Image: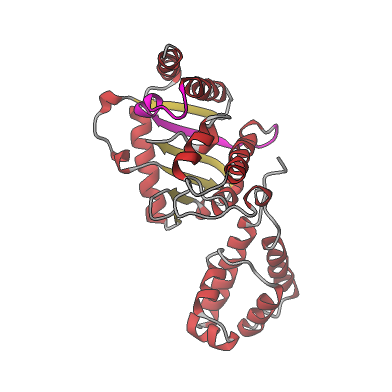
Amino acid sequence: MAEAHGPAGPRRRLGAELRRLRNKSGLHLEDVAREMSCSTSKISRLENGKGIPKPPDVRELMRIYGVASGTERDMLLRLAREGREQGWWETYTEGVQSERFVMDSPGRYPAMETEATHVRAVSMTVAHGLVQGAGYPGGVFRALLPHHTDAEIASLVDLRLERQQRLRAAQEPLALSLVVDEALLMRRVGGPSTMVEQIDHMLELNELPTVEIRVLGLEIGFHRAMAGQFTVLELRDPLDDVVYVEGHAGDTFMDAKSDVKLYREIHADVWERCRGGRDAVETMRRYRLAHSEQ
């Protein structure tokens, strides 16, 4: 896998700068959209880092905001160019038809994860994509994406496995703090051999110095994470941290400080109640044995 960088970071930084310049100019979205002869949603998407920036649009916005500094102009145009670069994951998602529920959005989620330094996640029903073995994701995708072709599913599986290379990177590996619900270890995806392979894969990853997997035991009963699994993506700038939540109505990304704080607290709460270290390993090995005997 290429060096961990992509267009998501530059797009978000460019958007933040454009929003700052607009606010400094005392203009509303409607004012700028009218001047640009475009929709307010286009300006909003650029400011939120969701749109693909075009240098001519950025130049026009700089004119509207009265940006005179050559240094500032160069910086904004550089971010626009970097924000148009193709992400490494796009070769895997090209031509893949989208569905509203795809377990790790094939485009935007890898873009955000590429910019992350630490992932804190809770997996309640399906193993997190960063710890799925070779056979497990195929079973997941075939169940959840019935309208996808075998070729599309194979491409998404390759993407999922490629994402894991950052966990093993020699420089700046991605840190992972993962809570796995005990019921997930019971729930069969594919045949028994697939589950044996999956648990072996998690045990192997758990030995990496920047990865820790804990098991949330059934004896805990009802807990704060019961509403569903989620991922907190910690980026290089803490102000950019994002929460990712999967759902049947589509994927949700939340970057409001209050949302990030809430999900951090939920993760910390269940993290402290989990089985960690040797206890977690022994739990995973016990379910591995159970699947191997079926």
Query: Would you say 5 lies left or right of 136 here?
Result: right
Instruction: In the rendered view, tell whether residue 79 sits above or below residue 247.
Output: below
Q: Position of residue 262 (x, y in %)?
A: 35, 48
Query: Would you say 227 lies left or right of 250 here?
Result: left
Instruction: In the rendered view, tell whether residue 179 sits above or below residue 36.
Output: above
| Pick the front one: 36 or 106 | 106
Q: Which residues are magenta?
A: 170-191
Instruction: In the rendered view, tell whether residue 260 sits above or below residue 273.
Output: below
- Count how many numbered circles sit on residues in the image: 0
Is 179 inside the magenta-drawn segment?
A: yes
What residue is drawn where x is 58% and y is 30%?
A: 134
Is 44 inside the magenta-drawn segment?
A: no
Q: Position of residue 147 (x, y in %)?
A: 49, 49
Q: Residue furthest left?
A: 222
Residue 147 makes an appearance in the image: yes
Query: Would you say 198 lies left or right of 122 here?
Result: right
Residue 28 makes an appearance in the image: no
Which quadrant would residue 63 be assigned to in this image?
Answer: bottom right
| Pick the front one: 18 or 138 | 138
Q: Position of residue 196 (x, y in %)?
A: 49, 19
What residue is drawn where x is 37% and y is 22%?
A: 275
Q: Position of residue 279 (x, y in %)?
A: 40, 16
| Pick the front one: 197 or 149 | 149
| Pick the front one: 239 or 153 | 153
Query: Would you say 57 lies left or right of 291 here?
Result: right
Instruction: In the rendered view, tell whether residue 248 sits above or below residue 77.
Output: above
